[in-house]
Amino acid sequence: MNPFEQTSFNRAINILKALKCQYAVVLPDGTKHGELEIVTKKEEKDYEYGEITSYVEEFVKDIPVGGTLTIHVGKYPIDKVQGACLNWFHKRHGAGSVTTSRNRLTGTVDAMRIA
């Protein structure tokens, strides 16, 4: 840290101490200040990053404007498949380019490209 950053940091620590706060601060170099324990919890995911989007892309990549399609959700949750479909169209064709609906009875997501 440069002298200005060090002075500002020391002031902040002194204020926390004066207020009798519990705190934990980790500097970019890894130095820890304060008495609180730092716990990093890694979020467990059910699927690999991009797995559902890759599955959905097989269905949606060649759909023309005005075209409709049905995506069978397979092993994935229906809301995640619908979300992946919406995200795929949003990234490639812009917001509002597709409308979707869930059909829980058949385990499918229906989509229609509108732009």
Image: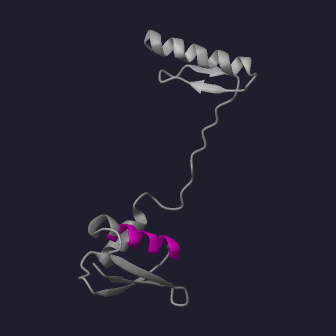
Q: Nearer the viewer, residue 95 or 42?
A: 95
Taking the view exactly as shown, the residue that stands out farthest to the right is 20
When asked about the image quadrant of residue 62, the answer is: bottom left
Quarter of the figure with the C terminus: bottom left
Whether 82 is among the magenta residues is: yes
Residue 115, compared with residue 69, is above or below; it is above
Give me the residue at 61% from left, 43% from top. 41
User: Residue 111: x, y in percent?
Assistant: 38, 83
Q: Which residues are magenta?
A: 77-89
For residue 50, what is the image quadrant? Answer: bottom left
The residue sitting at 38% across, 67% down in the picture is: 87
In the image, taking residue 111 as reference, residue 46 lies left or right, namely right
Majority secondary structure of magenta residues: helix
Q: Answer whether residue 3 is magenta in the image.
A: no
- Seen in the image, is 56 located left or right of residue 18? left
Give the residue displayed 28% in from the left and 87% down from the top: 67
Please name the residue shown 46% across and 79% down the image.
Answer: 73
Task: Quadrant for residue 16, please give it.
Answer: top right
Q: Position of residue 34 (x, y in %)?
A: 67, 21
Q: Residue furthest bottom?
A: 105
- Vertical placement of residue 57 versus 46, above or below: below
Q: Nearer the viewer, residue 58 or 64?
A: 64
The quarter in which the N terminus is drawn is top left
